[in-house]
Amino acid sequence: MLVAPAIGLVAALDPRRAYDLSRFWAIVNLRICGVDVASTRQARLDPSRPYVFMSNHASHFDVLAVVAALPEFQLRWVAKRELVDIPIFGWALRHAGHIIIDRSNPEQAIASLRAAKAMMDTGISVMIFPEGTREGHDHELLPLKKGGFMLALETGVPIVPLAVRDSRAILPRDDWRIHRGTIEVVVGPPIPVERQTREALMASVERFLTHELDLDEAPRAVERR
């Protein structure tokens, strides 16, 4: 929280430097908490081009783990509107150029995603938790929201799915105690979006997550609304 004002101020001068500061903050927090991040890539990624990264979401530590697993990328997060109301942190979140989505206003949410296109044209990647929230337990994948897939289709930017494992063991939901351990991040191959439907892309990401997270139950139906 103490770093948030510095990040916001640096972002006013150079958003990329502000993200570098955020990345440094994330690495320091992981080390202080005794958390290691082990990442595996299933295909080569081009650091000079943008991607739409999509990950499951089970713990607050997912954010730190993803940042550590993708050190060569400038990431901007798609964040829910409620986070802006957090003192200091919310101010820094908005001023650092992250994409704020008001889920109660579908038209505004879509407009915010479209506004991300100009940012992505400069080589910045977007990070999305398509479930929209942290799932109820380790062996569940919530229906995927369509917004991020629409953004990928409209911009032509490939989707890269990420499977974050064991983050809930580090920080269980509704618990403040942090446990030492290792978070695994599996970075999947880019999924081209050309000549693909939204439903096909959503199914591809869901299959990847279901397989890499070793979920017991069959894939859940993706959101169609």
Image: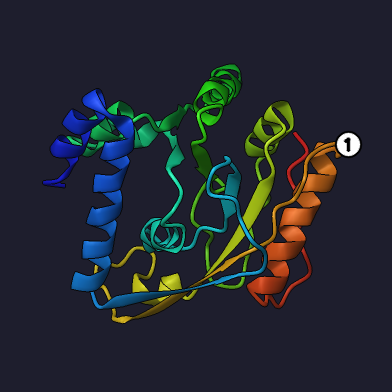
User: Can you tell which quarter of the image residue 117 is in?
Assistant: top right
**In what quadrant of the picture does the C terminus appear?**
top right
Residue 95, position as x, y percentages in the image? 28, 27
Q: Residue at x 44, y 53 (%)?
A: 72
Q: Please, what is the three-letter code of the amino acid marked with disc 1?
A: Arg
Residue located beneath label 1 in the image: 195
Q: Is residue 221 visible?
A: no
What percent of the width, then of the height, locates residue 143? 68, 51
Q: Quadrant of residue 15?
A: top left
Q: Could you tell whether 215 is left or right of 18 in the image?
A: right
Residue 172 position (above or below residue 143) = below
Image coords of residue 199 (percent x, y): 83, 42
Please tell me in which quadrant of the rendered image residue 84 appears: top left
Circle 1 SS class: loop
Task: Sort mark 1 into few (<14), some (14-19) or many (20+) by Cα contacts within 10 Å.
Answer: few
Let me know if residue 139 appears in the view: yes
Asked if residue 4 lies left or right of residue 37, the reply is left
Q: What residue is rendered at 78% in x and 38% in y?
A: 224
